[in-house]
Image: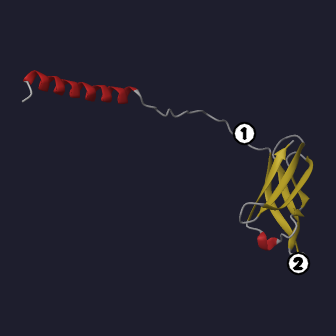
Amino acid sequence: MMPKWVAVCLVLMTVSMGVYTVAAAISQYTLVKPYVTEIAVATAKLQIESLSFVYDSTSNRYTSVAVTVRNTDTVQLTGTVYVYLYDATNTNVATGTYAGSFASGTTTTVTVTLTWTAGKTVTDLAAGRAVVQQT
């Protein structure tokens, strides 16, 4: 049979190991700190109001896009209109750009000619986007 003092020492050692494990777990952790910031959003002075696609039934493609752009500023601005058309895998099937000036306080309709990827037609079209960027 084991003497009482040995049993007490074993119990105390087990308790101290448990306390050490808990203390180590508490002091060794990673806290994910959320970062908060304020972001000011500027309203675009050039805005796309509408798009109208021109379809060619012979090639089964849109040949161009009439894009109406509004200049909300009090001065004439220059900008570039970008049109991107994508297939179901989000790959470009057609793109086009137009760079020009836009008179203050007016809407201007410009024609963006589209260049298609070889072998692609409107049957491949799944999505698109149009962007006007002030230059």
> Pointer 1: residues within 10 angstroms few (<14), some, or many (20+)?
few
The quadrant in which residue 78 appears is top right
Q: Nearer the viewer, residue 92 or 40?
A: 92
Measured in 3D between alpha carbons, the distance from the residue under mark 2 to the one under mark 1, in whole angstroms, is 41 Å
Residue drawn at 73 percent across, 60 percent down: 90
Q: Are marks 2 and 1 in contact (CB under 8 Å)?
A: no
Location of residue 34 in the rendering, given as x and y in whole percent from the top left corner: 52, 34
> Pointer 2: residues within 10 angstroms few (<14), some, or many (20+)?
few
Which of the labelled discs sits on residue 57, or is there none? 2
43, above or below 65, in the image: above
Location of residue 102 in the rendering, given as x and y in whole percent from the top left corner: 90, 48
Location of residue 63 in the rendering, given as x and y in whole percent from the top left corner: 90, 67
The quadrant in which residue 14 appears is top left
Residue farthest toward the front in the current orientation of the protein: 1
Instruction: List the residue tagged with mark 1.
Output: 42
* Left or right: 83 as drawn, with respect to 16: right
Q: Secondary structure at mark 1?
A: loop
Residue drawn at 8 percent across, 24 percent down: 3
Q: Quadrant of the C terminus?
A: top right
Location of residue 67 in the rendering, given as x and y in whole percent from the top left corner: 85, 59
- Which amino acid is tagged 1? Ala
